[in-house]
């Protein structure tokens, strides 16, 4: 397991000014890679990670410094290095979203897969990293299906969509009114659009800004004076203006709800100061959520994700163990191969020393080989069944596979 | 088929739907649906056997009337159970249905006032429409309870627990409105048929005054609820509350009147 290593420059250690400098691709390392080395690089807005086998840490770090313009000391300060089991565990944690800024986010898995596709095209990965990445994908799938980590939304806009779905069922049929044309309003409206809301109406004091946002989102701009009419017509309201006083007041909503004949209305007020008078919550069939209420819900979900992360870590530990077993089995294969190599060397030595030739030499060789194969058969079977690192190590020590045999062969 | 076996099947299906509410596993939902269909089938066989035993529509006692109401309401819920968005309603209906069946089981085979069933036209029409209307009110009651629970969860922002499986409020409101409207039409028709039946039997109004008044009172509560829903715009929570109050009043009147005036017209408020 000591073959795999990783260097990670991530949001926990490095500020964005550093992260944006350390953006690397596989091409940056291709000329450094020996014939049997493997390399995988992942770059997202929150991290740059390089995984490799068959290369020195110093070589990779030097190339990172060269490409980013960071000094060796700076790189050490803003990065973390993992080797062996820790590196594999880190890869699995990253793929499962447990190392993400928002725990459990699913986007990272797609990014890990995209980076893997690039490394396959560039042929920089082989059996070892391929297996590690496939194991990481399996771990991520298990974490998604066996825990509730990605179940609850942790963004205000997503939560607003969830609430709307619980009231209206299908937001494809709902009309969304966006009051304000600032960045926050735009983000929230685009999330609703992504989730299927197709009837977007934008109302803003500055009509030109409403027109611009409407064009961006594919909505319809309306003059600010039509606010009351639009409130009567819509199902979901996103309010995010810079107004210092509430623009959706209780008397206005009393009139609106009367005209709506009790049809429910959900108001998401993400403005600070608030755009919707808190008293509006008392209007019949009005569901009002301000930024604090939504933040409280989102925080609850984040706490839940942290709890689920504990369960996910258990799954990751199982998958790392499974990967480790595979690595050991690889070493067991190598040890078995060495055992047979040793056997052949002994047979050749004995036949040479016997001074026999012709048919007699051939018979001796056959008998010796058969006897020795029977002798090591049990060892081979045992190693195949229990390919643990300890067993492999004991076998190599007993048969001196790393000593006498290797020396003799080199000689 | 005995009522105890029917009760057991309803209970098992209820446990299945409650498990599905919390686990949201499709396999649990499928098993619960199968058990529920089996329960309703067993219930039908029991009612047919009872009809054979009584020699007519088995609604000759308050217990038999309640039994028929549970059966008709279950038929409506079978439809809900097979729609993915409304499957969970079974978790709220089946415990109530099971409870009612358990309560009336000992009295189901007792003889009713079969002599009053002599009118072949008005009597079956009266009993079936009234019991059908009451079954629809029972459905509306369960949906109203679910509406209030879900509404409360949404207001608290707690929509990711068991509430995740509950149907959206707009859908619940639509079901509630349809059940109330159809139930109201059925009850109105049932009361008219009841008056015609009393007239054909020569029963004096004084004999029926208590039950007719109670029936009229319940009718008024539902009429009020429907009026407010359509004319004033009491969609949602207020309609749910008036439905629950109306159904509670109907149940209380049914129990009280059958205890105080057991022989008023032999069938209590139910028929």
Image: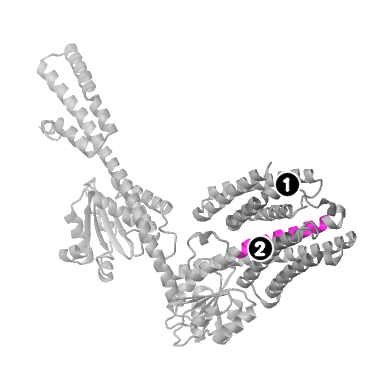
Q: How many marks?
A: 2
- Where residue A81 appears, as percent x and y from the top left, is 21, 57
Would residue A286 be found to the left or right of residue A87 on screen? right
Farthest-out residue, top = A360
Q: At 44% across and 70% down in the image, what residue appears?
A: A156
Q: At 89% across and 59% down in the image, what residue appears?
A: B201
Could you say which is closer to the camera, residue B183 or residue A48? B183
Quadrant of the snapshot with the C terminus of chain B: bottom right
Of the numbered discs 1 and 2, the one sitting upstream in the chain is 1
SS at circle 1: loop
Could you say which is closer to the camera, residue A209 or residue B11? B11
- Where residue B89 appears, as percent x and y from the top left, is 60, 57
Which quadrant of the structure image shows residue A183?
Answer: bottom left
Q: Which of marks 1 and 2 is in front?
A: 1
Magenta residues (range)? B124-144
Could you say which is closer to the camera, residue B145 or residue A353? B145
Relative vertical location of residue A316 with respect to residue A70 in this rendering, above or below: above
Q: Name the residue under label 1.
A: B109
Relative vertical location of residue A380 with respect to residue A141 in this rendering, above or below: above
Label 1: chain? B
Residue A350 is covered by the magenta coloring: no
Q: How far apart are the alpha carbons under marks 1 and 2?
A: 28 Å
Could you say which is closer to the camera, residue A143 or residue B66? B66
Would residue B194 be found to the left or right of residue B22 on screen? right
Report the disc number at residue B140.
2
Residue B197 at least partly seen: yes
Residue B135 is covered by the magenta coloring: yes
- Where residue A305 appears, as percent x and y from the top left, is 38, 60
Label 2: chain? B
Residue B83 at least partly seen: no
Please check whether the numbered discs 1 and 2 fall on a single chain.
Answer: yes
- Where residue A380 appears, as percent x and y from the top left, is 25, 29
């Amino acid at each position: 397991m000591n073959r795999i290593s990783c260097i990670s420059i991530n949001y926990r250690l490095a500020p964005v000014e550093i992260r944006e400098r350390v953006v690397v691709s596989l091409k940056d390392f291709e000329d450094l890679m020996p014939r049997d080395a493997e390399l995988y690089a992942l770059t997202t807005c929150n991290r740059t990670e390089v995984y490799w086998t068959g290369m020195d840490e110093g070589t990779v770090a030097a190339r990172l410094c060269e490409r980013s313009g960071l000094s060796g000391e700076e790189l050490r300060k803003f990065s973390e290095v993992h080797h062996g089991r820790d590196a594999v565990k880190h890869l699995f944690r990253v793929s499962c979203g447990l190392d993400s800024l928002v725990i459990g986010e699913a986007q990272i898995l797609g990014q890990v897969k995209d980076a893997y596709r690039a490394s396959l095209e560039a042929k920089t990965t082989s059996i070892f990293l391929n297996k590690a990445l496939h194991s990481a994908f399996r771990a991520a799938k298990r974490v998604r299906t066996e825990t509730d980590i990605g179940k609850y939304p942790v963004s205000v806009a997503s939560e607003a969509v969830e609430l709307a779905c619980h009231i209206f069922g299908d937001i494809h049929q709902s009309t969304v009114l966006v009051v304000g044309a600032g960045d926050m309003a735009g983000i929230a409206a685009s999330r609703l659009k992504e989730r299927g809301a197709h009837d977007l109406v934008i109302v803003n004091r500055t009509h030109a800004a409403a027109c611009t946002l409407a064009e961006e989102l594919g909505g319809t701009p309306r003059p600010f004076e039509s606010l009351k009419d639009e409130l009567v017509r819509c199902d979901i309201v996103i309010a995010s203006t810079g107004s210092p006083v509430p623009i959706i007041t209780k008397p206005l909503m009393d009139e609106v709800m009367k005209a709506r004949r009790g049809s429910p209305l959900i108001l998401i007020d993400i403005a600070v100061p608030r755009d919707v008078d808190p008293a509006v919550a008392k209007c019949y069939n009005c569901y009002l959520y301000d930024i604090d209420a939504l933040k409280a819900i989102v925080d609850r979900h984040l706490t839940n994700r942290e709890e689920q992360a504990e369960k996910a870590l258990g799954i990751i530990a199982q998958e790392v163990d499974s990967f480790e077993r595979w690595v050991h089995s690889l070493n067991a294969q190598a040890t078995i191969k060495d055992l047979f190599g040793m056997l052949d060397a002994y047979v050749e030595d004995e036949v040479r020393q016997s001074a026999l030739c012709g048919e007699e030499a051939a018979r001796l060789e056959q008998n010796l080989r058969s006897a020795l194969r029977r002798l090591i058969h049990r060892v081979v079977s045992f190693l195949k069944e229990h390919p643990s690192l300890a067993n492999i190590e004991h076998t190599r020590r007993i048969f001196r596979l790393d000593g006498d045999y290797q020396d003799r062969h080199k000689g | 088929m005995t009522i105890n076996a029917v009760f057991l099947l309803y209970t098992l299906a209820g446990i299945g739907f409650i498990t599905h509410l919390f686990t949201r596993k499709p396999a649990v939902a499928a098993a619960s649906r199968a058990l529920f269909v089996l329960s309703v089938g067993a219930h039908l066989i029991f009612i047919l056997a009872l009809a054979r035993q009584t020699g007519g529509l088995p609604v000759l006692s308050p217990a038999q009337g309640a039994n028929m109401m549970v059966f008709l309401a279950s038929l409506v819920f079978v439809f809900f159970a097979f729609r993915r968005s409304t499957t969970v309603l079974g978790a709220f209906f089946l415990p109530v249905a099971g409870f009612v069946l358990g309560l009336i089981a000992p009295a189901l085979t007792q003889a009713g006032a079969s002599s009053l069933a002599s009118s072949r036209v008005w009597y079956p029409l009266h009993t079936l429409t009234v019991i059908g209307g009451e079954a629809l009110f029972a459905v509306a009651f369960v949906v109203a309870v679910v509406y209030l629970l879900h509404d409360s969860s949404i207001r608290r922002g707690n929509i990711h627990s068991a509430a995740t499986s509950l149907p959206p409020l707009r859908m619940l409101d639509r079901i509630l409105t349809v059940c109330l409207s159809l139930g109201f039409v059925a009850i109105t028709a049932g009361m008219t048929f009841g008056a015609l039946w009393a007239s054909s039997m020569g029963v004096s109004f004084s004999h029926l005054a208590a039950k007719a008044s109670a029936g009229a009172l319940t009718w008024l509560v539902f009429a009020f609820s429907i009026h407010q829903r359509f004319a004033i715009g009491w969609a949602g929570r207020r309609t749910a509350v008036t439905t629950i109050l109306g159904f509670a009043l109907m149940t209380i009147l049914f129990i009280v009147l059958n205890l105080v005036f057991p022989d008023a017209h032999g069938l209590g408020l139910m028929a």
